[in-house]
Image (tube, rainbow, N blue to C red):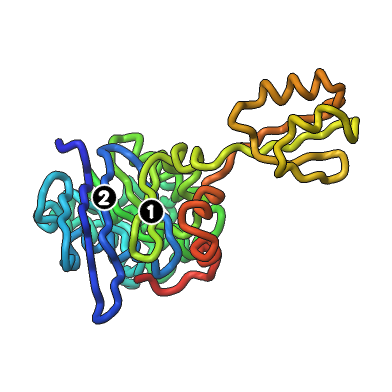
């Protein structure tokens, strides 16, 4: 197997006079979970469709599971598009089997696996129910199971959490983790940073059709220094000189960025100066803070907007 499940270089896509994707480079290691982060309209869906071979890039190249013709390995890929769609008159297990058949899985085997997957997902009561009778969360679970029924090596999910309540989001996260633990590569796009922070070691941030960052979540967070919240009994003294110039007072509390010299020299100055340390908390920046630093305030604000059409 190749080192990368996905290797894209210089992808460009124009729609008339609009450049939706502008020279994207992206690599996804085998067996990893990668989150594609960006607001609606950033180019996430267009990028995924080029990777899958659904649309052709205007420039650049892509290898999918080591193949330069992505459609030639479609049977090894599970894809959940942003636009959901199931035949409402089909029974749940038949809908799963049908999706597997589209990827080359025999119908009889698909029906057998469909029943098993529904039972494992706690939906045994829905096996023989028609899709039209299912709740939105249950229907989305059925479609996800149809995405994995043929046991793909790579799963690509486009905004899989869209429209789900907290309970069904949690169930979906569990299904994604289970696939990754079995060695499957998972890539999903989202405009909700919390999902990527909980699930992923790797993220790619897409903003304005470009990728300003792709790498480990820890690397993104390390671009910002930790924040310190200090509480002291004393209001003033020589120890104040040890605080950075940016330190902001809030009653008995001080808020500032951890100095590059680390916490030890700061602690020594506070103790030697009789500051009277009541509490000292060091908080590492989260992925949201890193996203703001990398993509900008405007892109971060768009991440909180209601769901809409994606470019």
Mark whose residue sits in front, 1 or 2? 1
Taking the spot 49% from the left edge, 41% from the top edge, the residue there is 223
Tell me residue 274's x, y (percent): 87, 22
Taking the spot 61% from the left edge, 37% from the top edge, the residue there is 226
| Mark 2 secondary-structure assignment | loop
The residue at which mark 2 appears reads as 149
| Camera-nearest residue between 82 and 105 | 82
Taking the spot 81% from the left edge, 20% from the top edge, the residue there is 271
The residue at which mark 1 appears reads as 212
| In the image: residue 13, left or right of residue 250 | left
Tell me residue 172's x, y (percent): 44, 50
**For residue 140, which numbered disc appears in the image?**
none
Snapshot quadrant of residue 257: top right
Mark 1: few/some/many CA within 10 Å (<14, 14-19, 20+) = some
Let me know if residue 105 appears in the view: no
- Examine the rendered structure and indicate whether residue 134 appears above or below residue 97: below
| Camera-nearest residue between 311 and 283 | 283
**Position of the N terminus by quadrant:** top left
Tell me residue 202's x, y (percent): 38, 42
């Amino acid at each position: 197997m190749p080192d990368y499940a996905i290797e894209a270089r210089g992808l460009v896509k124009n729609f008339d006079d609009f450049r939706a994707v502008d020279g994207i480079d992206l690599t996804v290691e085998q067996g990893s979970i990668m989150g594609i982060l960006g607001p609606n309209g950033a180019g996430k869906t267009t990028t995924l469709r080029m990777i899958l071979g659904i649309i052709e890039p205007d420039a650049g190249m892509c290898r999918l599971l080591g193949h330069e013709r992505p459609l030639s390995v479609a049977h090894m890929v599970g894809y959940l598009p942003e636009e959901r769609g199931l035949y409402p008159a089909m029974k749940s297990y038949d809908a799963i089997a049908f999706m597997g058949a589209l990827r080359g899985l025999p119908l009889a085997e698909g029906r057998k696996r469909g029943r098993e997957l529904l039972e494992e997902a706690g939906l045994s009561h829905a096996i023989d129910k028609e899709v039209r009778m299912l709740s939105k969360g249950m229907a989305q679970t059925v479609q996800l199971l149809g995405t994995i029924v043929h046991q793909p090596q790579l799963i690509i999910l486009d905004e899989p959490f869209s429209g789900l309540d907290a309970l069904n989001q949690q169930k979906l996260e569990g299904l994604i983790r289970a696939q990754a633990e079995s060695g499957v590569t998972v890539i999903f796009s989202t405009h909700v940073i919390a999902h990527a922070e909980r699930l992923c070691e790797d993220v790619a941030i897409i903003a304005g059709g470009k990728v300003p960052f792709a790498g480990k979540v820890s690397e993104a967070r390390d671009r910002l220094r930790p924040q310190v919240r200090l509480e002291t009994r004393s209001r003033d003294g020589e120890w104040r000189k040890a605080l950075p110039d940016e330190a902001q007072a809030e009653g008995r509390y001080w808020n500032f960025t951890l100095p590059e010299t680390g916490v030890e020299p700061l602690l020594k100055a506070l103790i030697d100066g009789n500051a009277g340390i009541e509490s000292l908390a060091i908080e590492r920046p989260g992925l949201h803070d890193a996203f703001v630093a990398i993509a900008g305030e405007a892109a971060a604000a768009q991440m909180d907007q209601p769901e809409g059409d994606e470019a």
